Image (spheres, coloured by chain):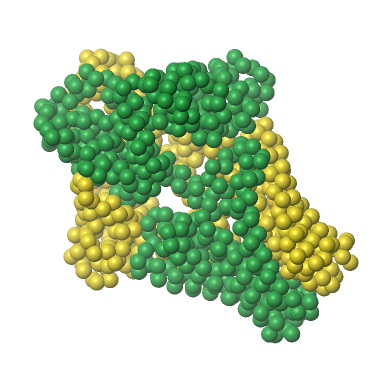
Chain colours: A green, B yellow
Amino acid sequence: MPVSTPNSERSFKLGDYNPQEYTAEYKLLYLQGLVADGSYNAITEFLAKQSEYEIANLLESFPTQDRLLIWAHVAEPIKGRVLAELEVDTRQPLMENISSTEISVLTQDLDAQDVFEILDTVTETVRTSVMATLDEDIRLQVNKLDTYMDWEVGSYMDPDIIQVHDDITLGQVQTWLRGNIDLLDDQSQELLVVDKSQHLLGLLSLVDLIKHEQNALVSSYIDNAITINDRLDIQDAAAIFRSEDIRFAPVINSHGELVGQLNGEDIMEIIQDDVDSTMRNLAGVSQDEELFAPILTSAKSRSIWLGINLCTALLAAIVIGQFEAVLAKVVALAILMPVVASMGGIAGSQTLTVVIRGMAMGQIGGSNRWWLFNKELWVGAINGIIWAIIMAIIAQMWFHDSKISAVIGCAIAINMTAANVSGISIPLMLKRMNIDPALSASVILTTVTDIVGFMSFLGLASILLL
Amino acid sequence: MPVSTPNSERSFKLGDYNPQEYTAEYKLLYLQGLVADGSYNAITEFLAKQSEYEIANLLESFPTQDRLLIWAHVAEPIKGRVLAELEVDTRQPLMENISSTEISVLTQDLDAQDVFEILDTVTETVRTSVMATLDEDIRLQVNKLDTYMDWEVGSYMDPDIIQVHDDITLGQVQTWLRGNIDLLDDQSQELLVVDKSQHLLGLLSLVDLIKHEQNALVSSYIDNAITINDRLDIQDAAAIFRSEDIRFAPVINSHGELVGQLNGEDIMEIIQDDVDSTMRNLAGVSQDEELFAPILTSAKSRSIWLGINLCTALLAAIVIGQFEAVLAKVVALAILMPVVASMGGIAGSQTLTVVIRGMAMGQIGGSNRWWLFNKELWVGAINGIIWAIIMAIIAQMWFHDSKISAVIGCAIAINMTAANVSGISIPLMLKRMNIDPALSASVILTTVTDIVGFMSFLGLASILLL
């Protein structure tokens, strides 16, 4: 249990501070202590020193019951921002007991994107009454966001853009910004430059705005911009951000009109979520399952994958069943059988991991697929033969039967080669069929390595030993 | 094969552009076409339109031989930046034939961090001679970076900081920046504020610099900063960035002196690499294995894990060997055996994935470990019983032997419960022993689910069927 108060004030300490006190885990332990002791004042005090992001992360680290308790101690003015930071599953129960009047208060100073997030969790009636209390500006922006599907760029963009004309001076831009202090928020890095007819010309960065002669024209410092279409899939937009190494992009609609902007930070979140979802898909955990989900929710969400796995395991069992005769005669086969399947499984998932990652980075396509296929074939064959020899020697020492040793050696070499080849072919085929490889490749791969493993092992055994 | 030229100029197109042409994969296909046709002029032309990051990514998407060809067509002035962007494994072969004079030319206009990256790949002699040709400023900064271990914050920081005093006006800061145009680069978002004795007071954001009255003092707009110690592990620094939701931090040494700054983008890269490495660790692929590594390199790098897996698979085989008698008598057991292990394996890895992700986010610790343990126990038991019943029914229809059905049902329930409990206990124990859970948890888990599965299944069978 921690003894000192986490160093969480937004101030810096020189020299002797303890970096550990800044970690999420340390804060979690500290808050757990306060909750266990029922030190409510201390909870309020502690939460007042945390960022909205941090509070959201802490709330997500407690079971539902404690969440409600902690939530009651979050300072009113930041509750809106915290709600916007939370995952939907965590936000929902916290919002169940909030009246629409309270929601109106919470959403008071939020930007459109945050309000949009929060209103996503409420009923249509509440939504309508909250919308009526919003500022005209924000309401229009929220309505704009609402016209997009949740996978479209439009629903992730910031509709609040700052436009400047190209024929004014840098100094005039600065003066204008100073007169409209709400315009620039801490996240801003770029202004959008438009001509007289509101056509986008490019970007003006804050750095350029500051560092050049103030009576120079905006038009001299326009950076070219890659625009993103509002109906584009957000995943594709993330790929463009990554491959073009950009941190900001104007969003345009199909008529070429500027409708918003995409920020690097939102895209980083998409990329982060994407890797997370790949990991979850590979393990067969549903996207929405949060760590502290109730028991029945988790049990249910994991069932689908277990069911699919049962089917493939039964398929493997049926294969084994075809070789009853040889199994009944040579019990050593039953003992060694899982080794063959297991080595193939690992070899295949090694390949699969490298390939799926390479696909996500856009590094696999066209002619290099054959290069990679060929490479994996050889890696599989080489490793297969090495481990086949090692395993054959072990089997020989164990069962003193050269036929059994030969059978397991051959089966391992065959299965590991097949596993590596499958590790690259399966995701490529799935992609061609427009199926997410991460979601289904590992279960198909296991099925292949089990079936090839059992079939080659028991099949060879039937030939040699019966 | 693509027919139109990828839309890769840094200019935007309104309306009718094809977003697909911006994707890394499209560019890869296009470049592959050029390489296959030997259209060398077209390669030069194409590469001239790509960002350094994009060229690095493309180089990494080709086998070594093609890399050298493409590298020869990269424009000289950007070769240095491209090298800095590359992974070490890809950079090494490209640098083998470059003389130290050429390296000096390449590193001419790079910042210290990039020069440091590149010199990391060369021999001591080349390093010394290149260092001698560097600007005084850059040389000192590179030397500073070089004093740190490669996991310390110091080796990731930007040593080139912009300091301003607190007692001047915002207008004076802007005038000064305009007179020193090299100071602000496109990445800049914050200036570091120091007092007369060079002590750090906090940060001044470019946004604040622009939007407030220009005769206001810097001291009125100082934002508090969380400082990061230069000897801190970069992973811990990444955790602080994440939990404090900061995008920039001054770096100080143990004497409290300001030595550099950490930028959000570098940290994002660390976090990204961290998730990647978790995925690789879970699958038993070494960190350095790149997609296009030569066959023998890949084969060797995957061997360790295959060897470990063979040992655990043999352990499972030994367990099975203990039950030879019952296996010899009832061949159905050999057929159904893998189903038990497989269901346990999936259930366990579902839990493991959720837990390892939660750990990385700092959401697991203290009292919630028991809550989670309890939750996983119940999820395992509930799903275990459901699938036990289903599997027992299937076994009954298949073998018409109620004892076998009872045995497989019980074994699945036991194994799935044990799997879920292991899925949370193993990573927690590993963490306590300061071992990276992602690296070893999955192999231990598989061993547990195999052994518990075979032991419960065959053990119960021995009791009921012998």
**Is B181 situated left or right of B156 in this image?**
left
Is A191 or B237 nearer to us in this picture?
A: A191
Residue visible at 37% across and 57% down? A362
Image quadrant assignment for residue B182:
top left
Is A134 or B41 nearer to us in this picture?
A: A134
Q: Where residue A184 appears, x then y in whole percent?
A: 28, 25
Q: Where residue A131 appears, x then y in whole percent?
A: 39, 24
Identify the residue at the far front of this view: A125
Residue visible at 68% across and 57% down? B343
Q: Where residue A142 appears, x then y in whole percent?
A: 36, 30
Residue visible at 66% across and 81% down? A460
Q: Where residue B289 appears, x then y in whole percent?
A: 47, 60
What quarter of the picture does the C terminus of chain B occupy? Answer: bottom right
The answer, for residue A222, to whether it is visible in the render is: no
Image quadrant assignment for residue A357:
bottom left
Residue visible at 61% across and 58% down? A308
Is B71 or A257 nearer to us in this picture?
A: A257
B261 is higher (above) or lower (below) than A110: below
A332 is higher (above) or lower (below) than A110: below
Image quadrant assignment for residue B251:
top left
Q: How many marks?
A: 0
What quarter of the picture does the N terminus of chain B occupy? Answer: bottom left
**Is B337 situated left or right of B74 in this image?**
right
Is A203 or A136 nearer to us in this picture?
A: A136
The answer, for residue A452, to whether it is visible in the render is: yes
